[in-house]
Image (spheres, coloured by chain):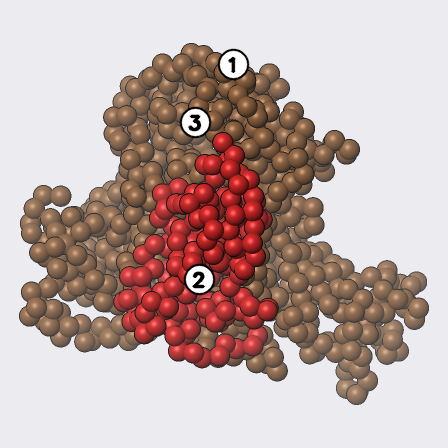
Chain colours: A red, B brown
């Protein structure tokens, strides 16, 4: 059954008619061409699909588009403002917190939530809080450093 | 190693600086372009119907209901491919058994031909207008299977009485031997002490976070194909597919591996899905996209490791190693994947000398087929298995000899180079004591007894473990590899295209799926040409743009691919000198090139890089009688030897005997990668490698039900992937003996961490517990059992 879905994505109102089985992540990727949000598993474990719904990090693979009717969604594409990277994005680049980049959008969206919830998180707390995001490349060392860099408020190097 | 916190200083050579990655911007803003992000005009979607059984005969396939389902465009089974004479998938390395017979190469069909041989084996391709329609239709296909007994246990595969392939009755692919058996037997006969251990090198599932994906399109106007595919070596994919399976001219096939979300070996191979999609794209007349679900990745990505081995080390009374004897059974899975046969032979037994001057080594390797997913190269590929075996038995030998584990290693280290091992390799350079000493200092080994006592006072057990690994990277040279059975070349290609304004596009045959070529390779070229890093673009992953290439695996990108680029850059400089000589009215031989300027030696006459490049394309004042216009050079580089990265890792753990919980107190890695271009990127490779190795040692294991052959670790709920909380922060450093046979002096860093960390961890754990062995993965239950004297 096809149903119309209306929501606000990265500040813009959108309405699309889709199969009622459509997941939010499919809606974002296939209907809105917002392909920065990725699918890395089918059991809500890897976190590559993490977006913000009404200001909270959620896994967009585990929710139907129909369930987020009327919500405010922010994806990785909506994080930078006016061409300025979000400090967490800049920190990941500064600290080499990404390699293949596939888990990165979800990791960054989760990390933003993590510091919103616990701005002074310790290394242990950061590692605990990343439980829902799997990275196979970095060994997490530089992801933790990136989040700590963001916490510190330091300015990234230009090049 | 350089400090990654230092900002990039453009006034200095970019070599050795932690230039921040140029590719990152698209990754952190959601603008990357992975295969599943590609949507083509008229896109259709493919779903593969897969076997639910480990081993079964297909009696019939009824497609009637599925073909009538909404949105279905086409359904293809093995019958259509057989009618079209589509070949099977080739194996890229021929191994001969001890008796001289070639390995058994049973057919590896693109879609099942009458039988399925592992859970997940592909039976049909369903193509529909939408993915959901394709999935719905797949549910309507009725396959009548006659279940057959499955061969799962690799130790018994050669004697089970059931055959995975009718033409390989004992399931044995080959029974290979390497080394001097007589010398080893003689050394054992006079040994004062023999240490013996048995190992299982646990089977792993690679799990790049981007699942495999492909999107194939046929162009009717020029009868060509384009395949987007998540792959580590698009030219090899094209070569194998065209020459061995589909019989297409390469000129009509373009393979593009765009942004690829991790590989770790699993995306080297030519997979049946890629071939089926390419073939079907012509029949359907529209592009077909398939992206693996994670459960499909678990079932069908080539798995890694899966060895069962025994090893014996013979020593004299002083702990000098006399000989090593190894017997290994290696699992090939149901079919021979692209490089499967080389992993437990050429990439394994040749590394059994490790860093030691053991004079005699002999290994026997039996490779068997089972009703499980194919097994092939996974980060390290053979070298982790060799290192695990050597470093575990050396640690145990120290315990047996009541010697310090660092001392027994130093006593047996190779100290003079070049050194020819008894297993066929010649190490060009190394400095093994230097990295061991540095690691011991970083780990404060002197303070360990006090830390152990402090743990004991808390009721905890503390242990320290070493691993001194060596690996062979940048596999080479092609003629030697060919003599050893390789069916492919192992060179790399590069093209350096200088544009009129002096900016440069570099085309490399190696491929980045996280390694950061766009930054590192640009640093190499910028340094050599004396131009800003930002003026160099790196292009990879497209057979339509890059002249040729063998791709990225075996930590070969910079050592082999980088060298090809350097050779092309040097040709550019040589031509630039001739142009400059003309412009400066000097002899060619008087021109020097330095910091982006061509100079007449001994004078102040000079001309800038940009003037020469412009002159090459606006050749008004140009020696047209002697020189072609343009500034665009190709190079192919075939290495003269492997490179030999080596290092020393120290792991320190504290064990809670009541719970089996292990805390990694510290993990120290000191690697000798030769010269380093970008320390930040190298550190990242080491971190990721160590985490993967610790995953193998601590928690990861692929498990099949021994009766049914069902994969019981088929999701992230069942297969334990390391998460941030499972992994410590690392202490890492480097030493440097530059590689002697490539102009960059580089060795390769991509696999080291995954090679060195498993034995370091298990050596630490067995030291803490006072046990001889603990099977990987050392789960809390296994640790708890060992800590409490219970049977494993």
Q: Dot 2 corresponds to which residue? A: A108
Q: Are marks 2 and 1 in contact (CB under 8 Å)?
A: no
Can you tell which mark lies on residue B64?
A: 1
Can you tell which mark lies on residue B50?
A: 3
Q: Position of residue B740 (x, y in %)?
A: 52, 65
User: Which label lies toward us, 3 or 1?
Assistant: 1
Q: Nearer the viewer, residue B439 or B9?
A: B9
The chain identifier of the residue carrying mark 1 reads: B
Q: Secondary structure at mark 3?
A: strand
Q: Secondary structure at mark 1?
A: helix
B497 to B64, vertically: above or below: below
Q: Is residue B686 left or right of residue B226?
A: left
Residues under labels 2 and 1: Cα distance?
47 Å
Q: Is residue B490 left or right of residue B633?
A: left
Task: Sort mark 2 into few (<14), some (14-19) or many (20+) by Cα contacts within 10 Å.
Answer: many
User: Which label lies toward us, 2 or 3?
Assistant: 2
Q: Is residue B626 left or right of residue B381?
A: right
Residues under labels 3 and 1: Cα distance?
18 Å
Task: Residue B520: name its quadrant.
Answer: bottom right
Residue at the farthest top position: B59
Residue at figure coordinates x 37%, y 28% from the top left: B119
């Amino acid at each position: 059954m096809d149903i119309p879905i209306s929501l606000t994505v990265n500040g813009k109102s959108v309405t699309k008619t889709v199969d009622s089985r459509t997941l939010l992540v499919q809606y974002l990727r296939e209907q809105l061409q917002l392909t920065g949000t990725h699918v890395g598993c089918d059991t809500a474990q890897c976190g590559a699909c993490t977006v913000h719904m009404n200001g909270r990090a959620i896994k967009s693979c585990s929710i139907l588009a129909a369930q987020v009717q009327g919500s405010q969604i922010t994806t990785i594409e909506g994080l930078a403002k006016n061409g300025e990277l979000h400090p967490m994005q800049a920190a990941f680049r500064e600290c080499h917190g990404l390699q293949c980049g596939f888990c990165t959008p979800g990791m960054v969206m989760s990390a933003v939530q993590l510091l919103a919830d616990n701005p002074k998180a310790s290394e242990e707390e950061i590692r605990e809080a990343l439980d829902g995001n799997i990275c196979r490349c970095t060994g997490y060392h530089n992801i933790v450093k990136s989040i700590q860099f963001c916490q510190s408020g330091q300015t990234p190097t230009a090049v | 190693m350089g400090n990654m916190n230092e900002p990039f200083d453009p006034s200095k050579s970019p070599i050795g600086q932690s230039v921040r990655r140029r590719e990152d911007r698209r990754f952190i803003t959601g603008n990357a372009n992975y295969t599943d992000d590609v949507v083509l005009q008229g896109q259709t979607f493919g779903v593969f119907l897969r076997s639910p059984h480990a081993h079964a005969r297909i009696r019939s396939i009824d497609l009637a209901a599925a073909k009538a389902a909404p949105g279905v465009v086409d359904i293809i089974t093995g019958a259509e491919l057989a009618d079209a004479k589509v070949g099977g998938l080739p194996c890229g390395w021929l191994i001969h058994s001890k008796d001289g017979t070639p390995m058994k190469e049973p057919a590896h069909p693109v879609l099942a031909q009458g039988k399925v041989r592992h859970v997940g084996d592909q039976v049909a391709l369903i193509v529909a207008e939408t993915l959901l329609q394709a999935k719905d239709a797949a549910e309507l296909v009725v396959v009548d299977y006659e279940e057959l007994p499955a061969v799962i246990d690799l130790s018994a595969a050669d004697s089970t009485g059931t055959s995975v392939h009718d033409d390989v009755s004992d399931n044995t692919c080959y029974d290979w031997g390497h080394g001097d058996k007589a010398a080893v037997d003689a050394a054992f006969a006079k040994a004062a002490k023999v240490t013996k251990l048995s190992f299982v090198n646990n089977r792993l599932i690679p799990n790049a976070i981007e699942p495999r994906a492909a999107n194939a399109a046929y162009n009717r106007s020029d009868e060509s194909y384009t395949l987007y595919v998540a792959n580590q070596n698009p030219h090899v994919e094209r070569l194998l597919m065209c020459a061995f399976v589909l019989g297409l001219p390469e000129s009509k096939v373009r393979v593009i591996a765009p942004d690829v979300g991790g590989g770790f070996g699993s995306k080297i191979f030519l997979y049946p899905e890629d071939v089926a999609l390419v073939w079907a794209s012509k029949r359907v007349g529209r592009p077909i996209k398939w992206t693996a679900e994670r459960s499909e990745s678990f079932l069908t990505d080539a798995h890694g490791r899966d060895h069962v081995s025994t090893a014996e080390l013979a020593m004299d009374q002083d702990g000098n190693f006399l000989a090593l004897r190894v017997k290994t059974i290696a699992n090939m899975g149901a079919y021979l994947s692209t490089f499967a046969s080389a992993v437990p032979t050429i990439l394994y037994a040749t590394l059994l000398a490790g860093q030691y001057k053991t004079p005699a080594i002999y290994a026997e390797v039996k490779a068997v087929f089972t009703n499980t997913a194919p097994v092939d190269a996974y980060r390290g590929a053979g070298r982790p298995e060799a290192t695990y075996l050597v470093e575990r038995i050396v640690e145990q030998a120290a315990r047996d000899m009541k010697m310090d584990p660092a001392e027994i290693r130093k006593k047996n280290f190779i100290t003079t180079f070049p050194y020819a091992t008894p297993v066929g390799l010649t190490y060009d350079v190394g400095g093994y004591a230097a990295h061991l000493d540095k690691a011991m200092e970083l780990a404060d080994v002197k303070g360990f007894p006090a830390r152990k006592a402090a743990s004991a006072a808390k009721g905890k057990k503390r242990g320290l473990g070493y691993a001194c690994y060596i690996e062979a990277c940048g596999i080479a040279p092609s003629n030697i590899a060919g003599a050893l059975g390789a069916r492919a070349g192992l060179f790399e290609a590069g093209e350096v295209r200088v544009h009129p304004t002096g900016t440069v596009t570099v085309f490399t045959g190696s491929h980045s799926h996280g390694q950061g070529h766009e930054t590192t390779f640009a640093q190499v070229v910028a340094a050599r040409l004396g131009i800003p890093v930002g003026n160099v673009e790196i292009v990879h992953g497209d057979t339509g743009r890059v002249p040729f290439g063998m791709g990225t695996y075996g930590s070969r990108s910079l050592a082999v691919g980088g060298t090809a680029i350097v050779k092309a850059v040097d040709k550019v400089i040589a031509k630039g000198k001739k142009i400059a000589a003309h412009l400066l009215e000097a002899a060619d031989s008087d021109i020097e090139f330095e910091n982006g300027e061509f100079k007449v030696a001994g004078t102040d006459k000079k001309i800038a890089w940009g003037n020469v490049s412009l002159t090459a394309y606006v050749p008004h004042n140009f020696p047209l009688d002697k020189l072609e216009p343009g500034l665009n050079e190709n190079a192919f580089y075939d290495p003269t030897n492997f490179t030999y990265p080596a290092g020393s890792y120290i792991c320190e753990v504290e064990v809670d005997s009541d719970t089996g919980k292990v805390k990694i107190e510290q993990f120290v890695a000191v690697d000798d990668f030769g010269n380093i271009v970008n320390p930040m990127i190298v550190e990242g490779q080491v971190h990721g490698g160590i985490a993967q190795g610790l995953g193998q040692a601590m928690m990861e294991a692929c498990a099949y039900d021994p009766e049914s052959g069902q994969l019981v670790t088929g999701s992230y709920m069942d297969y334990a992937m390391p998460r941030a909380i499972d992994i410590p922060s690392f202490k890492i450093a480097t030493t440097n003996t530059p590689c002697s046979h490539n102009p960059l002096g580089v060795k390769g860093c991509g696999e080291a961490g995954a090679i060195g960390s498993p034995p370091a961890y298990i050596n630490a754990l067995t030291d803490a517990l006072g046990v001889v062995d603990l099977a990987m993965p050392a789960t809390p239950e296994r640790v708890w059992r060992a800590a409490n004297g219970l049977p494993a």
